[in-house]
Image (cartoon, rainbow, N blue to C red):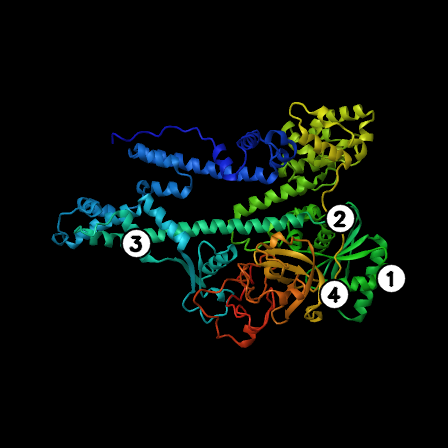
Amino acid sequence: MTDAAAPVPSTFDPVPALAFALALPASGVAAVIALLDEGNTVPFIARYRKERTNGLDEVQIRAIEERRAYLVELEDRRTAILASVAEQDKLAPELEAKLRAATTKAELEDLYAPYRPRRKTRAQMAREKGYEPLAHKILAQVADGNPAGETEEALAGGRDIVAETIADTAEVRAFVRRELAEHGKLASEVVPGKADEPTKFEQYYQFAEAVKTIPSHRFLAIRRGEAEGVLRAHVAIDTHKVEAGILRLAKVDDSSPWAEQLRLAVTDAHKRLLAPSVENDVRGELKQKSDQAAVEIFAANLRNLLLASPLGAASVIGVDPGLRTGCKCAAIDVTGKFLGTVTVYVAQGEAQAAKAKEDFVAFVKQHTPRAIAVGNGTGGREAEAFVKRALADAGLRDGTFVVQVNEAGASVYSASDVAREEFPELDLTIRGAISIARRLQDPLAELVKIEPKSIGVGQYQHDVHQPLLAKKLGDVIESCVNFVGVELGTASAQLLGYIAGIGKSLAKKIVAYRDQHGAFTSRAQLMEVSGLGPKAFEQAAGFLRIRGAANPLDASAVHPERYALVERMAADLGVSVGELVGNAELAGKLDLARYVSGDVGEPTLRDIVAELGRPGRDPRAEFAPPKFRDDVTTMEDLKQGMVLEGIVTNVTAFGAFVDIGVHNDGLVHVSQLAEQFVKDPGEVVKVGQKLTVRVLEVDHQRKRIALSARKPADRQQQPQGDRGDRGPRPPRGDRGDRGDRGDRGGPPQQGQQPRRDRPPRQQQQGPRGDQQQRNDPQRNDPQRNDPQRNDP
């Protein structure tokens, strides 16, 4: 072709697109990209390169990093498509311009559709038979000709060519995609033969919700139902409206003798080629959005859990509860070192209980712990009650407090390679008790040893795109670890591996060096570790702490590159560096304007002064143990209206789960989280937060507890049945795996009445986020069972 040519090489600059998409200054975006290209890490850039980025924070920097990756992938795909079309000698200037202007992968693929290599199609076979001229007549809607004079085979062949041509037209594909995305409904139904089987997907047996509004957890629930062979789903759309739109784009001419042939071709194009392909695209985009939403919820919960208040350097006894096999108790010192263990049997008769009390008290007197951490798993409340009674009878309650610890993922750690390396000679349950004790000392340091998705603060983590989940959770852990800082003398290899610039391999080398040469005495000594070069040192040093080092700045967040500046500050004040570090009054006297120069501006100087005032301060909140009621240890102790203090263990799109000390967490539905309207539960509660709640309803059969964080009077003040867009109450199915609770509700199905074929008990009982009167119009909401109740 004379109008086709090789593509002109492009010089890809992502800065303008990133600045526009993220609403950030182009100069800051360009600086971040340059710093990332230089091998700098996100925590280092956010903390120590504020002048270059104009003060962009870590969230903004990570957004630039993530969005840039998408744009790079988009540009790589654009380059490949341009080359492919050029090789076919079909790269006309107009097509090249459209390909270069495309801003999304979907737009690129639509433009590429006619040129994509494919298996032999019906249209290709029709072309081989010579029916293309007939197809041109149909497409052009010529005013002459007689379709009746053609054979049915010829007409069918011509329509096949027309159908493929229409289906491969970018404008048509874009139109159909918009229709499905804007006006389509994701509809699901039960697979024949499964309707009479009780499953966790019953609320989706006859279900439909708009594609553009369906929340992440419901879409992922339907996908799981499909994967398990219970449901089948599709995107429902007004076919006649879509085909009418395609006909307009194809410029049907009712006066043409070929108009009917075009209509038939359009119907075929939509049903056979466009609908399946575009529906896959739309569902793929919906899956990406749902994955992103689920991952964001998980990431926010994980951050709050990792940054939970640490008890700190205190001796602890950890108790891994067990009714049949006994409670495994492990003592650790202030550094987390394992000291000893004992097993006590608290539920196997009076003789065993007496011996358990005697053995446990002796164990406590031997190790004199500051706290006793009891895992909150099965038997946790019984174990806690035993511990408190034993301490009280022995007169030891004044010096030691007892606290329940979330043990989610402890069993995963116990059986992991990390645990085997740490304690090769110990039983799994003893390792679990040690982990429980260490979690109380420092949740962050201990939880980094566990695969993040096993910690138990997400929903549908097994269904989302695993690389996306791993990347996001890894970023969260890296962010938290560097935010808090790490004590170089005691940090595990797992914890050190998340420090900026280090990674797993270098972390092991640092620990090996420490084991061989003893504790580090200065940050500079890190350079002696094999493989740790200047760049890694630059990235990591500011996030590592060495308490008691000769240079007091080594215990602070002041970067070694600014030590000389601090020495100058101290000299200007007429004091030593040691006198300046930790003296907020002296640091406050510094005239920062005197020290602005080169790459040091006011942002860095303000950080330095703040650090000098409180060097190496742990930014996490002060530890305060939760106060569970001693008289409430099981669900049987709960009464409607009872007010309790609890700890938020998980936050989802539909509410928050709260541990109130009875082993089974209760659910505070989004409608019961606050007096005001709440759209996002994460806006008002966080994992690890203390929350005062009121018991609304207890379903002993299903082990379900409905709670409210609102005042009782507010329930009469709010119009019943007016729930805004908060969604329905959660379904009544078994909670199942606490770590992956999944969908707890869905909207009323449009045009569908609540199912009446269930026993009255199922229609009237079961905890919901709010317990309104029996005439509540949403009381019989069909969205009941939890699709993740048996999540592996």
Q: Which residue occupies the extreme bottom position in the image?
A: 760
Q: Are marks 3 and 1 in contact (CB under 8 Å)?
A: no
Q: Give x and y (percent) for residue 247.
A: 27, 51
Q: Which residue is mark 1?
A: 394
Q: Would you place residue 170 above or below residue 156 in this image? A: above
Mark 3–mark 1 Cα distance, whole angstroms, equals 82 Å
Position of the C terminus, as image quadrant, is bottom right
Inspect this view and state whether residue 517 appears: no
Q: Is residue 6 above or below residue 460?
A: above
Foreground label between 3 and 1: 3
Q: Secondary structure at mark 2?
A: loop
* Element type at mark 4: helix
Q: Which residue is mark 2?
A: 622
Closer to the chain start, of discs 1 and 2, is 1
Give coordinates of residue 245: x percent, y percent. Answer: 31, 51
User: Could you tell me residue 389's position as x and y percent?
Assistant: 82, 64
**Residue on which disc 3 sits:** 243
Task: Give, as a three-letter code, the residue at label 1.
Answer: Ala
Of residues 488 and 331, the one drawn nearer to the viewer in this rendering: 488
Quadrant in the picture for the N terminus = top left
Q: Quadrant of residue 31?
A: top right
Q: Position of residue 686 (x, y in %)?
A: 65, 52
Disc 4 residue type (three-letter): Glu
How many numbered badges does the structure rendering display?
A: 4
Q: Secondary structure at mark 1?
A: loop
Disc 4 designates what residue? 382
